[in-house]
Amino acid sequence: MTALPDYPVTLLMRTGLAARYDHCEAMFQLGLRIHLVTEDPTAAADPRFASVTVVQPGTTTGDLVEQVLTVMTETGSAFAVTFLEMDIVAAGRANHRHGVAWSRPEADAIARDKARQRAHLQVSGLPSPVVAPITELPADDSVFELVGRPCVVKPTQGSQSSQVQLVGDLAQLQQALGAISRLAESGEQHFFDDGKPRVWALAEEYLPGEEITCDGVVVGGQFFLGGIHSKLLSEPPWFEEDMYSLPYGDEAVEFEITELMTQLAKSLDLRTVLLNAELRRAADGQFHVVEFSTRISGGHVYRNIRDVHGIDLVRVFLLAAAGLTEPAREAAAWRHPGRVATCIKFLYRTGVVVRNTAGEAAGDPAFRQYYPQAGPGAEVRAAPDGFDVLGLLSVWDRYVPADHPARVRAAAARVAGKLSIEVRPSGPG
């Protein structure tokens, strides 16, 4: 098996290390010498990292690029990589300045800004929702005249469906945009690191069909499909992610989405990169690109694709990034249609976390992993008060096409009921 023993790389992950444990583990097992740049000082105790550089919260993108470049130069890193949405711009700029030939910082910048995404998709002739850019408050009914009623409102630099809402009247529109405006000004969660941009929110056409997320890898300019997750979302007006199931199970749809992702990769001139896209069916049945990013999904999505389809997207990307193009192509070309069925269950609560562990769930045969996203003492908020994820549960089961995805979703609900979770109401006492 091809490896990269002691090959130095810089990993930029200011936050989100816990939910991307598998990504880091894949790097370590490949033999890489990993130099981490993070805000998490506890990462220094992780022996998988050859060095850990701690950056301060509130660091601007420009300053972050300089710090990453310093680490790359001092450690002899061949390139920088990130699996965090909010860090793709800094990693891309650092790679470009470091002379990494496959780096595409302009594509990273487009991917990080949904307003720029929409413009790019339109110019490239790729299907996407009708959109109205929001630059100021208050908005008026002309928004609905352009995109229809109801419409979806979202921040241009968000993540994980945070502050994404379906609105049907002017009062709801104003309230949703007000919340996004405050988020853009606050700098919370690294969504708007460099301040509030001119276009800070979008109102877009509501597509009523199913939603999917596609993850793959581009090697030498060629897109290889990893997996397509069927998404189950909470009931409107919110778009909290409830369950992700795999495999998709329809070869015709997999071919359709692969063709669309190939066009997207070519339009961005991508050479070597991890690539993700969220897509949704319109009323005419055609899939439209809702958003895309030059990284793959976090947490269980990567592991589930590896379990179900036998393709290790992180390993393929790292081999290609290191110049081992042919071994990377060979590893990406073989893909099983579905060895098992998997499902990710998102957990949400509002209050102060008392306990958040796997508990008895870990003994269930369907249990795969549980990643708590908030520890004891942390305050979490679910919609409409916030969009915090309490934890991510992953389960697996036999893949029975006739009962998929209902069977594995039922397993996820059952195992979730065994988690050891206690969240008390916020407030005095």
Image (cartoon, rainbow, N blue to C red):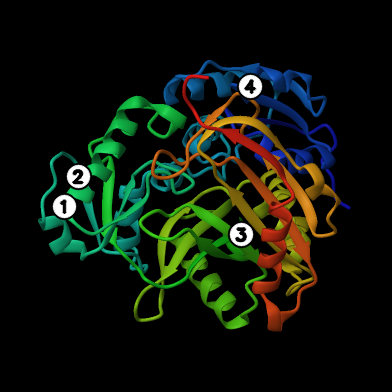
Mark 2 or 3 closer to N-term? 2
Q: Amino acid at mark 1?
A: Leu
The answer to whether any part of residue 272 appears in the image is no
Residue annotated with mark 1: 170
Give the label, 4 or 3, closer to the camera.
Answer: 4
Residue annotated with mark 2: 174
The answer to whether any part of residue 207 appears in the image is yes
Q: Residue 384 placed where, x, y %?
A: 39, 44
Q: Is 145 located above or below residue 161 in the figure?
A: below
Q: Amino acid at mark 4?
A: Asp
Residue annotated with mark 4: 40
Give the label, 2 or 4, closer to the camera.
Answer: 2
Residues marked 1 and 2 touching at CB (< 8 Å):
yes
Residue 409: which quarter of the image? Answer: bottom right
Report the residue at 63% width, 22% height from top.
40
Mark 3 or 1 closer to N-term? 1
**Badge 1 local density, few (<14 within 10 Å), some, or many (20+)?**
some
Residue annotated with mark 3: 216
Report the residue at 84% width, 45% height from top.
3
Label 4 sits on a secondary structure element that is: loop
Mark 1 or 4 closer to N-term? 4
Closer to the camera in the image, 43 or 1 = 43
The residues tagged by marks 3 and 1 sit, at their Cα atoms, a distance apart of 39 Å
Mark 4 or 3 closer to N-term? 4
